[in-house]
Image: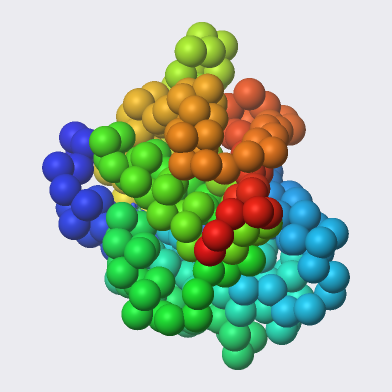
């Protein structure tokens, strides 16, 4: 599959991948641990200031709910989470799982976050998580999406973004290419996933922002206290998590 021409085409590819998505992630050592790590870091930062009360969170690009589950495990059953995703098929997988009462899902593009938030009407959340979302947003719309994420988190709230970033790192790019073509795509064929989405995965990561490009976007959006970490194992230097804060003194 060439790069999808539209957000709709990409959402349809995720629809086709949705039935096998969880199975394929289970075969990726470190996938769930990395989600848990990012969700725990996000919740810990919020709890440091806010104590034990219920948190309100966005899970942007929530997919089949794996990142949402990581947030529930980190924040506890009284959490309120809105999971947003463009793909009806991925959301169907998510909704089929058991969730605490405060978890809901909405089908929308991250680019439409301001409208979705207005319709929701609860005001800025405490935090936002976006795992493997930003590289799927067209490059010329990423600043606007990061800015919208900033706006939908209250002053003093935190944002966590997790994704693969290899641009500018020759070793990381080579490892990524070997893993994609040697393991991930063949597995998707054998397990009757959607190999097209995994070819797209390879390309979209090569084209994704470098960590410094994303860092600059976060700064342009007004986020501060930006801190990066990388995963362990084969994903070291490839999978990165960044946490950033909306300044406390800003007006909501
Ligand atoms: C790789 S999955 C990650 C799902 C989940 N966050 C996880 O960690 O397992 C990426 C998800 O982003 C969604 N997505 C891609 N582009 C999007 C966009 N512009 N707006 C909203 N969702 C989008 C896809 O439908 C897909 O479910």
Residue 208, quarter of picture = top left
Quadrant location, the N terminus = top left
Going 48% across and 46% down the picture, which residue do you hit? 132
Judged from this view, the residue extending furthest toward the left is 5
How far from the left and from the top, in percent, is residue 10? 24, 51
Q: Which is nearer the eye, 185 or 163?
A: 163
Going 64% across and 49% down the picture, which residue do you hit? 247
Vertical placement of 89 versus 26: above or below? below
Vertical placement of 182 versus 11: above or below? above
Tell me, yes or no, if residue 124 can be seen here. Answer: yes
Judged from this view, the residue extending furthest toward the top is 170
The figure's colour scheme reads rainbow
How far from the left and from the top, in percent, is residue 246? 61, 50
Q: Quadrant of ligand 1?
A: bottom left
Vertical placement of 147 versus 227: above or below? below
Q: Is residue 82 left or right of residue 232?
A: left
How far from the left and from the top, in percent, is residue 36? 71, 55
Vertical placement of 224 versus 96: above or below? above
Q: Which is nearer the eye, 103 or 227?
A: 227
Q: Which is nearer the eye, 241 or 223?
A: 223
Q: Is residue 198 left or right of residue 170?
A: left
Judged from this view, the residue extending furthest toward the bottom is 101
Going 59% across and 34% down the picture, which residue do you hit? 239
Residue 108, quarter of picture = bottom left
Q: Is residue 25 left or right of residue 107?
A: right
How far from the left and from the top, in percent, is residue 90? 38, 66
Q: Is residue 100 left or right of residue 25?
A: right
Tell me, yes or no, if residue 66 can be seen here. Answer: no
């Amino acid at each position: 599959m060439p790069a999808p021409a539209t957000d709709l085409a990409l959402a349809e590819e995720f629809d086709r991948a949705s039935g096998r998505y969880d199975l394929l992630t289970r075969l990726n050592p470190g996938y769930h641990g990395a989600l848990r790590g990012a969700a725990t870091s996000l919740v810990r930062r919020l709890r440091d200031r806010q104590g034990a009360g219920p948190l309100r969170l966005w899970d942007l690009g929530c997919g089949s709910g794996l990142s949402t589950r990581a947030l529930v495990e980190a924040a506890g059953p009284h959490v309120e989470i809105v999971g947003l995703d463009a793909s009806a098929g991925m959301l169907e997988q998510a909704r089929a799982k058991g969730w605490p009462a405060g978890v809901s899902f909405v089908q929308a593009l991250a680019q439409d976050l301001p409208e979705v938030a207005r319709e929701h009407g609860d005001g800025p959340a405490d935090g936002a998580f976006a795992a493997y979302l930003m590289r799927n947003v067209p490059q010329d719309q990423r600043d606007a999406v990061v800015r919208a994420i900033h706006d939908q988190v209250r002053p003093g709230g935190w944002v966590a973004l997790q994704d693969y970033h290899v641009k500018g790192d020759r070793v990381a790019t080579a490892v990524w290419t070997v893993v994609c073509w040697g393991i991930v795509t063949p597995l998707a064929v054998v397990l009757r996933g959607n190999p097209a989405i995994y070819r797209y995965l390879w390309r979209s990561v090569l084209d994704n922002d470098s960590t410094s490009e994303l860092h600059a976007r976060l700064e342009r959006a007004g986020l501060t206290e930006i801190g990066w970490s990388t995963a362990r194992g084969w994903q070291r230097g490839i999978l990165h998590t960044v946490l950033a804060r909306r300044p406390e003194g800003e007006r909501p």
